[in-house]
Structure formats: structure tokens, C-alpha cells
Amino acid sequence: KKRGENPTGILVHTAKATGFSSVSDMLRSGLDL
């Protein structure tokens, strides 16, 4: 189990900055970070 660390936490800012509602939407769009 994770120790409270969210691997997509930092990407949330990127996702919202690029107009996606969530990281999962961003990843589904095919954006490869």
C-alpha cells in the first residue's frame, strides 16, 4: 500500500494547466510525460 504518496500529484497541475479536468484524462489523450 502506498504511504500517502500520489505519483500523479505533480501532474495534476500540468493537467489543469493544459486544460484537462484530471490526470487520467490527460494520460488517456495520449500525452506522454
Image: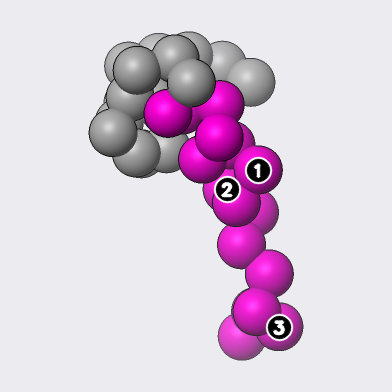
Is the residue marked by circle 2 packed among few (<14), some (14-19), or many (20+) residues within 10 Å? few
Label 1: few (<14), some (14–19) or many (≥20) C-alpha neighbours in 10 Å: few
Q: CA distance from mark 1 to mark 2?
A: 6 Å
Query: Against 16, is 29 above or below?
Result: above
Give the total number of marks visible in the rendering.
3
Between 33 and 11, the residue placed more toward the observer is: 11
- Circle 1 SS class: helix
Viewed as shown, does residue 13 lie left or right of 5? left
Q: Nearer the viewer, mark 1 or mark 3?
A: 1
Left or right, 14 with respect to 15, comes to: right
User: Mark 1 or mark 3, which has the lower sequence index?
Assistant: 3
Q: Pointer 1 and pointer 2: residues touching (CB < 8 Å)?
A: yes
Which dot, 1 or 2, sits closer to the camera?
Answer: 1
Image mark for residue 3: 3
Residue 10 coordinates in the image, percent (x, y): 65, 43
- Identify whether 11 is placed above or below 2: above
Residue at 51% of width from left, 40% of height from top? 12
- Tell me whether circle 1 and circle 3 mark residues in contact (CB < 8 Å): no
In the rendered structure, which amino acid carries the disc numbered 1? Ile
Colouring style: one colour
- Within the magenta stretch, is there residue 25? no
Task: Give me the residue at 42% from left, 28% from top.
Answer: 16
Q: Which residue is mark 1?
A: 10
The local secondary structure at tag 3 comes to loop
Which residue lies at the image location 57% right of the left edge and 48% below the top edge? 8
What are the residue bounds of the magenta stretch? 1-16
- The residue that disc 2 covers is 8
